[in-house]
Image (cartoon, coloured by chain):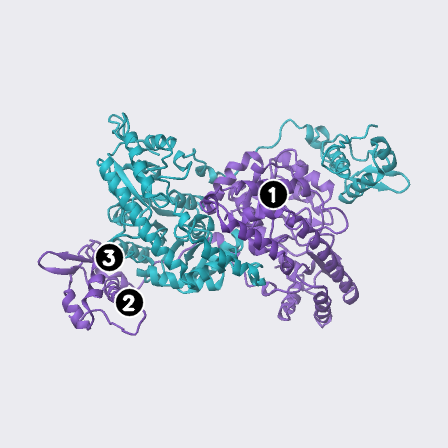
Chain colours: A cyan, B purple
């Protein structure tokens, strides 16, 4: 009998491993059958021309794992209990290794809507990619000295599993910041540390909504929120956004019994409008009376240029109906993966349980570092600097657009790190964005944010991570795309295409 | 008309904010009505005895946010468009702030099974808490100098959003490690970086299983896996574990058409047994023919004491049916929150899409650090040291149990960082564990890992994070609990209670 092992002396794989792998594969692929005899280690070593030691090691392992069995006085055999001997008729007829028909590869369909065609405007960084803060202005020095301080002598409590809600001192710091800067009514016990607003949305969707539950979604709205809600099984009810924010009356007309509403009241994503006081109160009244939940995604509210930041919707809520979501991705840097969600007190145990089942707890080090970063004033200082910087970049973008592309209507530039440039209704903004991406201009078409027929066309332009010079240059390049034949011209005969 | 604002000069809240908050709250609580006139800033400032500047700032903000409106020549008013003026009869009858019946607080029931009574054995660290590596032996020096190296001059690509699959050089390092050390067949493209095995299970469950899909679960088995699968809507089919691992024949008898199976073949959680070759092949054959998926949770396979580590089940798979899950929590430290999942190539886009919808991408810094930590040999060195250390601790525990509690049968001590000490069937192991926890001995009762009627009783003892001296002392203390009246004695008349 030929040994089923070919030895390659030049391979980096150790000899014992080659012997082990050879026999195991031969058994798995049914080249060796249950009960078949294998040579003695002495014979095999001689035959392969190698020392007996690797053969012994391999055989011991094959015995330990149950591929081989030793019979006293008779030698070593392929284990008789291997599956060939299980009495299943179908097996006898066709050994599975030779089976022509493997089973189907079925997967959950809930992920189907997430499998979109690649979106070219997400293909690079630079002008006008959304959600890119000025990471080159991040105070790396202060940050890394705090990291070193915590790493030098780490407390065991920061190395072991932590609280699913997060590190207590950091939650205190976040609660205090949110009370002062965002008018959020909360105690540290209500703050859960998450990896960013996306995880907050995912956990909130799991806790709040049964499969099939109708949920109001801003139209146009944030695709990431749609994904999290869809994956939880919620049924999205698109509710139009006008100049005052989500049109609550339209939502009541479409589905008054919705179980929740997703809103970005400080700076609507993508249109940039701020929800008015009237709409806020109307939305809270609906939630109070119907038992709906409001998810307030306050992703970039820290930057507001003409007035003080608008206080949170959560701070107006007297009925603990609002789940408040925020992130450090925009104010520090995205790869940090730290955000937070403020949870109504009675829902804290559910949020904690779902979080624990999803990923146990957040990593600890950066929570400890961030708590100090806030306490020692670095955070406030960085925010103030970035507010000035982004105000300059915004002004440069608004000016450049007014000069180069006066036909575009700028909306939503009062806050945040992006604005929308509206094109005549019916413009094929997606085609324009695809052509822009091919030239390194990463601008999202407004139509990509609609679930139904897009009512508006336009380009969403991020300016956080782009210098004023780059902005002016990029707007000039954008101009040639918009004014070229077929650029921003409405496509008269056909209705605007749905995304 | 009295101003609705009370000024507290001693409060740390700025004066403008007190004025703003006072008016806003009065409007939200309907003490001021839509269209009502407010005093001039001059009159209000005089009345409150403060300068006019904070009053002006507050009024500007209230105007900007839409709580106030200015009418030329007439003064400032509470905005008329506030919800009282929306024509809804129910509103007129009973303003919501006075509504006696707020809506229900409905939540998704999928989280109900996660809301368990507190488990006292999870209440502290120390002997014999599970899943606690020797974090005090972690090479902090080497680690923090690598962290500093990456932080000193961070590349922008490490600060921005990253690939949902993880940082490419780290995925290469993980793939190479898994091929060599665990016999996993994979390319870096199949490796997804996650926050630990829990997130891997959560994502796998979402991708693979429709709500209601039957999935084999080891009985007894890992509660964290049950939680992830349950939350995804899978229907768990408990399949008994015997001395050879999951009893595949029993699984076939219970539900041959299961859509998946969760297994811990290297070191079963909690019993510690290793799945034999025969069972592995039988399980793979079932998966191949039925189209079932196998989730292999290889959470602590790096530590094996009498033979070489058992190669992964995934490496035997010729049909891309195995989702291989591993973590750095046990081999480095849990608060790192870094793990990985090796995904069949055709499922990579789905795993990536679900991950992106859940939390976008993993944090980048520690991936870059870990890639170096592995490449520079720190990882291999630490693993070898810990294998020696845990072997000593295991020996100390086995010896101490043999001396102090010979009536307990030790199982599953060939690998990992825990073993199980079996008690006579019918012992109330949960009561024993509760009493042990009260004395600072954190041992999980075997019955807590059963979904149905527990077939075995016992205590699961972790020894990774406990010194030999602590182990000997703790076993002595455990002895007094076990032998005290009602301790380990079976409770004859009643059947064993279900967890």
Residue at the (46%, 55%) spot, across then down = A141
Mark 1 or mark 2: name the one nearer the start of the chain.
2
Neighbourhood count class around disc 2 (C-alpha, 10 Å): few under 14, some 14–19, many 20 upward: some
Q: CA distance from mark 2 to mark 3?
A: 38 Å
Residues at marks 1 and 2 on the same chain: yes
Q: Which residue is mark 3?
A: B90
Neighbourhood count class around disc 3 (C-alpha, 10 Å): few under 14, some 14–19, many 20 upward: few
Residues at marks 2 and 3 on the same chain: yes
Q: Nearer the viewer, residue A60 or B482?
A: A60
Q: Nearer the viewer, residue B261 or A141?
A: A141
Q: Is residue A166 visible?
A: no
- Tell me where residue A119 sits by quadrant: top left
Q: Nearer the viewer, residue A464 or B133?
A: A464
Mark 3 or mark 1: name the one nearer the start of the chain.
3
Percent coordinates x, y for residue A237 in the rendering: 34, 44
The subunit carrying tag 3 is B
For label 2, the SS is loop
Q: Nearer the viewer, mark 2 or mark 3?
A: 2
Mark 2 or mark 3: name the one nearer the start of the chain.
2
In the image, residue B144 above or below residue A480: below
Q: Which residue is mark 2?
A: B14
Question: Among all residues in the image, which is located at the extreme left?
Answer: B73
- Tell me where residue B475 sits by quadrant: bottom right
Q: Is residue A50 left or right of residue B209?
A: right
In the image, residue B304 above or below residue B121: above
In the image, residue B357 above or below residue B410: above
The subunit carrying tag 1 is B
Identify the disc placed on residue B21: none
Q: Which residue is mark 1?
A: B174
Q: Nearer the viewer, mark 3 or mark 1?
A: 1
Percent coordinates x, y for residue B312 in the rendering: 67, 42
């Amino acid at each position: 009998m030929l040994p089923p092992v070919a030895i390659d002396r030049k391979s980096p794989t150790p000899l014992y491993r080659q012997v082990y792998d050879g026999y195991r594969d031969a058994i798995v692929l049914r080249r060796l059958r249950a009960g078949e005899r294998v040579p003695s280690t002495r014979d095999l070593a001689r035959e392969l021309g190698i020392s007996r030691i690797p053969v012994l090691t391999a055989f011991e392992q094959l015995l330990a794992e149950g591929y081989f069995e030793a019979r006293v006085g008779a030698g070593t055999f392929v284990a008789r209990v291997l599956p060939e001997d299980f009495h299943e008729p179908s097996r006898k007829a066709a050994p599975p290794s030779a089976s022509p028909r493997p089973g189907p590869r079925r997967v959950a369909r809930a992920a189907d809507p997430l499998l979109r065609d690649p979106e070219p405007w997400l293909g690079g960084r630079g002008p006008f990619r959304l959600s890119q803060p000025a990471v080159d202005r991040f105070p790396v020095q202060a940050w890394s000295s705090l990291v070193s301080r915590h790493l030098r002598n780490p407390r065991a409590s920061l190395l072991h599993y932590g609280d699913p809600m997060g590190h207590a001192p950091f939650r205190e710091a976040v609660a205090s910041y949110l009370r002062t800067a965002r008018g959020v009514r909360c105690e540290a016990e209500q703050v859960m540390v998450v990896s960013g607003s996306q995880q907050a949305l995912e956990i909130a969707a799991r806790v709040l909504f049964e499969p099939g539950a109708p949920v109001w979604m801003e139209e146009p709205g944030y695709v990431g929120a749609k994904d999290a809600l869809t994956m939880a099984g919620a049924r999205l009810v698109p509710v139009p956004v006008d100049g005052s924010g989500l049109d609550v009356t339209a939502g009541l007309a479409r589905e008054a019994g919705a179980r929740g509403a997703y809103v970005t009241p400080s700076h609507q994503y993508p249109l940039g409008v701020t929800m008015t006081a009237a709409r806020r109160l109307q939305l809270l009244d609906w939630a109070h009376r119907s038992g709906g939940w409001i998810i307030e995604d306050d992703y970039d509210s820290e930057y507001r240029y003409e007035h003080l930041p608008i206080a949170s919707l959560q701070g107006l809520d007297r009925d603990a109906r609002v789940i408040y979501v925020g992130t450090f991705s925009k104010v520090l840097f995205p790869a940090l993966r730290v955000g937070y969600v403020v949870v109504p007190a009675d829902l804290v145990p559910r949020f904690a349980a779902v979080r624990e089942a999803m990923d146990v707890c957040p990593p600890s080090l950066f929570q400890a570092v961030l708590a100090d970063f806030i306490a020692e004033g670095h955070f406030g200082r960085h925010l103030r600097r970035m507010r000035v910087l982004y105000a300059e970049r915004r002004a440069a973008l608004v000016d450049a657009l007014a000069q180069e592309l006066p036909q575009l209507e700028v909306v939503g530039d009062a806050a945040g790190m992006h604005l929308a440039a509206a094109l005549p209704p019916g413009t094929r903004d997606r085609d324009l964005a695809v052509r822009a991406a091919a030239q390194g201009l990463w601008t999202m078409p407004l139509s990509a944010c609609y679930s139904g027929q897009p009512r508006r066309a336009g380009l969403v332009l991020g300016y956080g991570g782009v210098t004023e010079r780059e902005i002016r240059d990029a707007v000039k390049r954008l101009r040639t795309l918009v004014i070229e034949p077929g650029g921003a011209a409405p496509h008269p005969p056909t209705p605007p295409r749905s995304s």
